Image: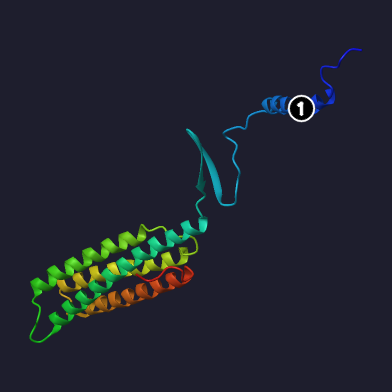
């Protein structure tokens, strides 16, 4: 009777099955397509930009933030103009009052040169406001502001004309009063613009 060299041949079945499963898994995984390096996941408010070596996420700008930034810059410029306009008004009133004092506190030549400076500066401010582009929703305020400071510039010129003419002073005084009124109107409209912007932009 032949002797079986391996009295338990069934003990090799399990290792062979395991080895076959490992081999199958290996070849199956190798056959899968590789993931594309350009594949990105999109999330709300974020875009993906492919760069050398990988993908870098970038945040999409918020339109609300941009609009608020435009309003901030716009109101800051109005505050600057308004501040300079108030200084010019104080100067013009001072010149006019000093020239009318008896005895005069400001002589003609001094009054003329100082009024010329006020008129020139007022026109420069008027041109700056006219060149501004109002953010959405503030177009009406911009129109009112441009009109007010344009009146101020013209009034400053008329005050100078009244000083240098043979007018007894009525034209000059009326022009100075008109300048003060236009300056006040401009100041009020700056506050109206700030309110119309939603109050989100603090006063400088």
Q: Can residue 134 be seen in this view?
A: no
89 and 49: which is toward the camera: 49
Q: Image check: 35 left or right of 192?
A: right
Q: Could you tell me how many numbered marks the image carries?
A: 1
What residue does disc 1 label?
Answer: 15
Residue 68 lies, in percent from the top left, at 46, 61
Residue 180 versus residue 24 in the image, above or below: below
Q: Image check: 26 left or right of 46?
A: right
Extreme residue toward the right, this view? 1
Residue 79 lies, in percent from the top left, at 33, 68
Which of the 4 image quarters holds residue 168?
A: bottom left
Q: Which residue is drawn at 49% across and 70% down?
A: 198
Q: Which colour scheme is used?
A: rainbow
Q: Image check: 197 left or right of 9?
A: left
Quadrant of the image for the N terminus?
Answer: top right
Q: Residue at x 52, y 50 (%)?
A: 60
Quadrant of the image for the C terminus?
Answer: bottom left
Secondary element under disc 1, as helix, strand or loop, is: helix
Residue 184 lies, in percent from the top left, at 33, 77
Extreme residue toward the top, this view? 2
7 and 134: which is toward the camera: 7
Residue 92 lies, in percent from the top left, at 20, 75
Q: Residue at x 23, y 64 (%)?
A: 121
Mark 1 neighbour class, 10 Å CA radius: few under 14, some 14 to 19, many 20 or more: few
Which of the 4 image quarters holds residue 142?
A: bottom left
Q: Residue at x 59, y 51 (%)?
A: 44
């Amino acid at each position: 009777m032949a002797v079986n060299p391996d009295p338990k041949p069934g003990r090799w079945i399990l290792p062979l099955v395991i080895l076959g499963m490992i081999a199958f898994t290996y070849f199956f995984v190798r056959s899968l397509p590789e993931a594309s390096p350009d594949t990105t996941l999109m999330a709300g408010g974020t875009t993906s930009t492919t760069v050398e070596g990988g993908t870098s996420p970038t945040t999409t700008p918020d339109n609300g933030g941009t609009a608020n930034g435009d309003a901030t810059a716009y109101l800051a410029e109005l505050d600057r103009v308004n501040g300079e306009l108030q200084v010019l008004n104080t100067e013009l009133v001072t010149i006019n009052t000093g020239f009318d004092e008896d005895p005069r506190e400001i002589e003609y030549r001094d009054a003329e040169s100082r009024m010329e400076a006020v008129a020139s500066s007022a026109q420069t401010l008027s041109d700056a406001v006219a060149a501004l582009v109002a953010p959405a929703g503030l177009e009406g305020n911009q129109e009112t502001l441009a009109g007010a400071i344009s009146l101020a510039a013209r009034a400053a010129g008329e005050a100078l004309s009244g000083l240098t003419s043979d007018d007894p002073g009525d034209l000059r005084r009326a022009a100075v009063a008109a300048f003060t009124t236009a300056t006040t109107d401009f100041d009020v409209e700056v506050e109206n613009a700030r309110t119309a912007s939603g109050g989100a932009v603090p006063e400088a």
